[in-house]
Image: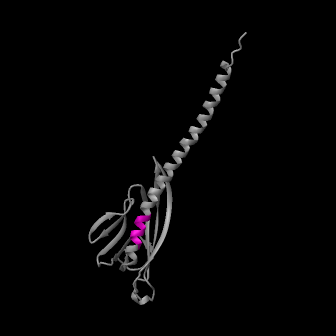
Amino acid sequence: MTHYRGYTLIELIVSVGLFSLVMLMASGAYLMMISSNRNAQGITTGIDNLSFALETMTRNIRTGTDYSCNLSGDCLNGASSFSFTNAKGIAVTYDLLGTMIQETTGGESSMLTDSSVNISSLMFYVFGTDPTDEEQSRVTMVISGTVSVERGRTESFTIETGATMRGSDI
């Protein structure tokens, strides 16, 4: 009498079912990791673009002179437009055009942010522009908006930064 060693049909069905369940859970976790990575990359791209725009603006403002907010010097209550003369003696203006930050230098305009960043509010607070006030000129920028994460999803942000004129105007 020969005894055959092997697996029964029931044992094979149970093992294939368990294997399928484990693989289904593992692939679900993998897909969630991919989605999270896409979200993080979308946020990072938008924030990197915004950081570059802010760094460009603050560097130019620090080395500039003749600050004015809506063409009126100081603006303690904030304004949506800011102008100054850059280090090369060229007039520069920053303002909000739609949902992007616009830089106008010597009459030529360019966008500092791209479509992944939607700016909803851009406010400039300017202090110390009058040479007789014994204050160093400084600018505070407050920017609010959203960053596109993925298909229709956004993350909101509010950033505040400042720049002080390097040269003395006192």
Q: Image check: 12 left or right of 84?
A: right
Quadrant showing the C terminus:
bottom left
- Magenta segment, which residues? 51-58
**Above or below for 104 versus 131:** above
> In the image, what residue occupies the spot 69% across and 15% down?
4
**On the image, which quarter does residue 15 sit in?**
top right
Residue 159 horizontal/vertical position (percent): 49, 66
**On the image, which quarter does residue 28 sit in?**
top right
> In the image, what residue occupies the spot 36% across and 63% down?
112
- Pick out the residue farthest to the right: 1
Q: How many marks?
A: 0
Residue 86 horizontal/vertical position (percent): 33, 77
Residue 14 horizontal/vertical position (percent): 66, 25
> In the image, what residue occupies the spot 41% across and 55% down?
116
**Above or below for 1 versus 141:** above
Main secondary structure type of the part rendered in magenta: helix
- Pick out the residue farthest to the left: 107
> In the image, what residue occupies the spot 39% across and 84% down?
167
